Amino acid sequence: DAGVIQSPRHEVTEMGQEVTLRCKPISGHDYLFWYRQTMMRGLELLIYFNNNVPIDDSGMPEDRFSAKMPNASFSTLKIQPSEPRDSAVYFCASSLGVVSYEQYFGPGTRLTVT
Amino acid sequence: RKEVEQDPGPFNVPEGATVAFNCTYSNSASQSFFWYRQDCRKEPKLLMSVYSSGNEDGRFTAQLNRASQYISLLIRDSKLSDSATYLCVVTFISNFGNEKLTFGTGTRLTIIP
């Protein structure tokens, strides 16, 4: 298996622009997670899905952030409009469960908003 | 109080030494515990799960102390390749019935030749 795939790997955009991050989970995994990592705050869980349904979005910072999972093999995280403070590494991960199962992380998308 | 707290380090340890660090958690209902390892500019990867009875994997030993609400990671005979950031993860069932998990901010370890 190719593992969790994320695109793009790097994104540089100007403040106010829309940013869309993409993720393909490992086939057969029914949980998908979006994280944001910064030096100041560490790794923060933004939202997670189970069988394509959002279960917990309490970590989504504000309405500018939205996430979708239209099918079992694809998810997007969108930021509109982007702000400099959104600059971070965004990871997608997938697993067979939450509480007791290993999470497999993608390589991350390094986002810079200028 | 943060849900999960770790000493950020850095821990600078000579090769061959033993090093240990802890992770404290605030929710007494926490169910599962893990240690992840993250190399510089890479994604986190599972190092080991932490079981109530404690568990060992080669040079690595993980322990759970539910009474004091902390987990620990011990690395014996440290290698240069052990240099990384170690993240603890704690999971629990929320009052709303959904599963939640929290990552600590990580402890940075550097093994010195």
Image: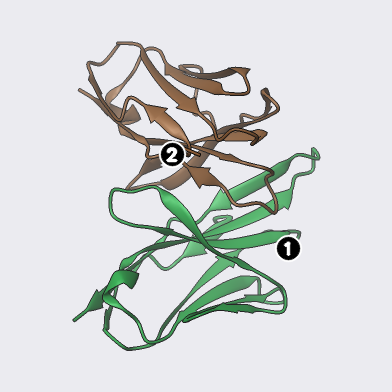
In the picture of the structure, the residue carrying the numbered disc 1 is B28
Q: CA distance from mark 1 to mark 2?
A: 31 Å
Drawing shade for chain A: brown
Q: Residue furthest front?
A: A1
Q: Position of residue B4 (x, y in %)?
A: 55, 58
Which residue lies at the image location 67% right of the left edge and 33% below the top edge? A30
Q: Establish if B107 lies above or below A28.
A: below
Q: Total marks drawn?
A: 2
Q: Is residue A98 visible?
A: yes
Q: Position of residue A51 (x, y in %)?
A: 70, 27
Q: What is the crowding at mark 2: few (fewer than 14 residues within 10 Å), some, or many (at least 20)?
A: many
Left or right, B31 with respect to A43, comes to right
Q: What secondary structure is marked by label 2?
A: loop
Left or right, B69 with respect to A87, comes to right
* The chain coloured green in the image: B
Identify the chain of the residue marked 1, using the numbered disc in the image: B
Q: Amino acid at mark 1?
A: Ser
Q: Quadrant of the N terminus of chain B?
A: bottom right
Q: How is the image coloured?
A: by chain
User: Residues at badges 1 and 2 in contact (C-beta under 8 Å)?
Assistant: no
Q: What secondary structure is marked by label 1?
A: loop
Q: What is the crowding at mark 1: few (fewer than 14 residues within 10 Å), some, or many (at least 20)?
A: few
Q: Establish if B57 lies above or below B97.
A: below
Q: Position of residue A49 (x, y in %)?
A: 64, 29
Which residue lies at the image location 30% right of the left edge and 30% below the top edge? A9
The disc label shown at residue A106, or none: 2
Q: Position of residue A81 (x, y in %)?
A: 37, 12
Between A59 and A95, the one lying in front of the other is A95
